[in-house]
Image (spheres, coloured by chain):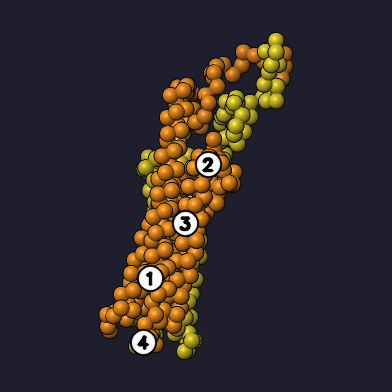
Chain colours: A yellow, B orange
């Protein structure tokens, strides 16, 4: 600090390329981030990893939504045991269809973008669609699953048959899809803030 | 590492104080943002505004949760018309109590911090608690409100009395609190990413 300035900044002799966001909390002199070829490469790998996790979550969400949709849509076992006689089961089916469509389309888009390298929608708009889509579908899924629970509970107090079992299976699938979509919404929220602040 | 390192890292002659995450996109040399006294002042004002909005949302959430709690807890009008005979209404009451406690405590903490200027929990931990708290309470609120809707609908098809009206009022209050907490979760998610990346 006193006379010869060259030996300053000794703690960081080589610039740490990425993750510089961790290293610059209250310290006054942050090293230049993404500096050099290694830094850029590491950042690309980090972004690539995030994309893969996001695709994996959406694909899982698609699987669970599709199962919920199929189980509920085939849940017809005679009078009093048809899903379409109860509004909560109709609602659960509608949200399962919506969620299947949304996660299916998003997975298809992500696979398409990863294989061709071309963006269908520009980065920032897509980050918005990603975040709000995931978040809204997550809210709808937990709403649909929750609304179908009390009726199923009440029916199972009386008798346990294939109708109530199918309903319970559909509800479980929707809860699982909700957890997955909730995680995905957190990830795309992170991406959105990164996109808008970079 | 070798002999004279001083002339390296020339691109940033003076350290950009904060928001340095803005300066690391693909463009090599953006002007340092938040630079000088005006920049720091502007950022303080921006953060202050965010804190006020967050406090406002939580206070509104507290109001709606408290109303939901009071309306449901006083919803006892004789046999068959007591809220505690139905599991969905008990669930709605439980979540209303939880949400009242959470938003009340958070509002009290924020007012305390704003008036004394001292932090009760350190910034980054608090941002985590804020985000996960808001998000979980939002999910619980929509779950409770959704689960109570079908039973209320079915009762109102038969007769419209003070019991069903109170239930419907409680559900509406929980939906409103859910919207507010959902917004608050988005805001604290933004804060969390900012905190961890700055």
Q: Residues within 10 Å of mark 4 (few under 14, many from 20)?
A: few
Tell me what residue is drawn at x 48 percent, y 86 percent: A157
Residue at position x 42%, y 34% in the image: B45
Q: Mark 2 and mark 4, same subunit? A: no
Q: Mark 2 or mark 1: which is in front? A: 2
Q: Which disc, if any, is residue B71?
A: 1
| Mark positioned earlier in the residue sequence (1 or 3) | 1
From the image, state whether disc 2 or disc 4 is nearer to you: 2
**Residue nearest the observer in this picture, A91 or A115:** A91
| Above or below for B169 versus A51 | below
Specify whether disc 4 shares its chain with disc 1. no
Q: Which structural element holds mark 3?
A: helix
Closer to the N terminus: mark 2 or mark 1? 1
Residue B119 seen in the current view = yes
**Secondary element at tag 2:** helix
- Residue B4 seen in the current view: no
Secondary-structure class at tag 1: helix
Image x and y of residue A16, in percent:
63, 29
Could you say which is closer to the camera, residue B7 or residue B34?
B34
Q: Do the numbered discs 3 and 2 sit on residues whose CB atoms are within 8 Å?
A: no
**Callout 1–callout 3 Cβ contact below 8 Å:** no
| N-terminal label among 3 and 2 | 3
Mark 2 to mark 4 CA distance (whole Å): 62 Å
Q: Which mark is residue B121?
A: none
Residue projecting furthest to the right: B2
Q: Measured along the vertical axis of the image, is residue A127 above or below residue B21?
A: below
Question: Could you give the CA–CA distance between mark 1 and mark 3, rounded to whole angstroms?
Answer: 18 Å
Question: What residue did someone put label 2 on?
Answer: B116
- What residue would you read off at disc 3? B103
Which residue reaches farthest top? A3
Query: Dot 3: within a 10 Å radius of its alpha carbon, few (fewer than 14), some, or many (20 or more) residues?
Result: many
The residue labelled by disc 4 is A80
């Amino acid at each position: 600090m006193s006379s010869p300035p060259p030996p300053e900044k000794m703690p960081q002799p080589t610039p740490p390329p990425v993750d510089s966001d961790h290293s610059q909390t209250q310290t006054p002199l942050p090293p230049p981030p993404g500096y050099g070829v290694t830094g850029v490469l590491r950042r690309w790998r980090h972004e690539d990893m995030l994309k893969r996790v996001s695709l994996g979550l959406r694909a899982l969400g698609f699987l669970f939504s599709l199962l919920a949709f199929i189980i509920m849509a085939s849940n017809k076992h005679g009078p009093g045991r048809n899903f379409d006689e109860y509004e909560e089961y109709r609602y659960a089916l509608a949200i399962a269809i919506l969620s299947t469509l949304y996660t299916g389309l998003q997975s298809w888009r992500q696979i398409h973008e990863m294989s061709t390298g071309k963006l269908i929608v520009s980065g920032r708009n897509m980050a918005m669609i990603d975040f709000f889509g995931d978040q809204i579908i997550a809210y709808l899924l937990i709403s649909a699953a929750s609304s179908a629970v009390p009726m199923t509970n009440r029916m199972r107090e009386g008798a346990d048959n294939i109708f109530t079992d199918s309903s319970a299976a559909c509800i479980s699938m929707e809860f699982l899809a909700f957890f997955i979509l909730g995680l995905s919404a957190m990830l795309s929220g992170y991406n959105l803030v990164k996109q808008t602040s970079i």
